[in-house]
Amino acid sequence: YGTVEDIRTKHFRHHVENDDVVWFDYEAFFKRHPLVYRVTIFLEWCYIPAHCILMHAIMVFTGFIIPERRNQLPRNVTVILIRGGLLLTLALLNPLAFMGYLIAYMLMIIVLRFVDGLEHDYPYRTNLFTDEVSENKGDLVWEQEHTFSPILSWRYEWVNWLILNFGYHNAHHAKPTTPWFDLPTLHRERFGENPDTVIRLWPQLVMYHRYRRYRIFHDAPGLKDVSGKDFLRAAQSAQLTGGNAASFLTSF
């Protein structure tokens, strides 16, 4: 619904500025709309990715909602009409296929946010359309200290192919132009053969289940606010909430 250039720009700024550069302050939104927040965390408790579905819904109407993208309104309307028409046709011709599409889309969102939820320890900054400069821009040492690699398997590298080696995030940040299939090799070259440099799958699954109601405000009881090496150790022992809404498919 948006443009490839929007996705590219946000992703490049993330790498250059070492920040989660955004427009939408979802924490402020949920504080202003407590009923929406309560419904959202209830759905999250039911394993429905309501927070990220909200983000994707905003993306659908990006030209209407984001003032800086009003110039995309004609394109936005065209895409909505085409995709909406196709989905309506599918729903009329084959309701089961339509329901299958919706379920598949929801599963895609779950996978995307699962693999995105632990890759950095810093909050978002609402400077996508402002002149505010991120304080750690260009600091390569700081970048690696606050980047993490939540992979699916250390022993069996091929398992990570299921997500195109997405979890090797330290390697991706060390050399962003590296093809996906070379990321495991680059990780071992840069960070060694020690599996303590990554976050294994089991603690990721534990955190995703245990803290599914707390990933909006990171307010789970009993957890410390940590960063850097302490963040890595906490993640390895399943003592973090993880995050939502980090996908670059929602380019705002």
Image: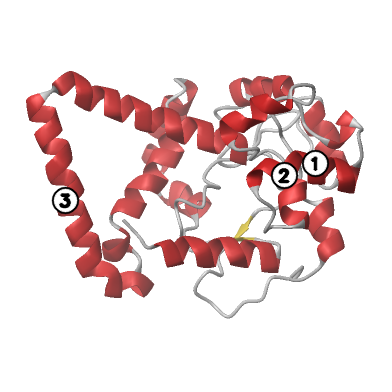
Q: Which residue is depicted at the point 20% across and 46% down?
A: 83
Q: Amino acid at mark 2?
A: Asp
From the image, tell me which residue sits under label 1: 185
- Residue depicted at 71% across the width and 52% down the height: 122
Q: Quadrant of residue 161?
A: top right
Q: Position of residue 222 (x, y in %)?
A: 75, 28
Nearer to me, 118 or 176: 176
The local crowd at label 3, few if under 14, some if 14 to 19, many if 20 or more residues have their Cα within 10 Å, is: few
Residue under numbered circle 2 = 182
Left or right of residue 205, residue 96 in this image: left
Mark 3 touches mark 1? (CB < 8 Å): no
The percent position of residue 187, horizontal first and vertical second, equals 81, 43
Question: Quarter of the image holding residue 19?
Answer: bottom right
- Label 1 element class: helix
Q: Which residue is mark 3?
A: 82
Please tell me how crowded label 2 is: few (under 14), some (14-19), or many (20+) other residues with Cα within 10 Å.
Answer: few
Q: Secondary structure at mark 3?
A: helix
Pick the quarter of the image with the N terminus: bottom left
Q: For marks 3 and 1, give the CA distance.
A: 42 Å
Instruction: Confirm or deny contact between disc 2 and disc 3 (CB under 8 A).
Output: no
Label 1: how many Cα within 10 Å (few below 14, some 14–19, many 20+):
some
The local secondary structure at tag 2 comes to helix
The reply to whether callout 2 and callout 1 are in contact (CB within 8 Å) is yes
* Residue 223 falls left or right of residue 29: right
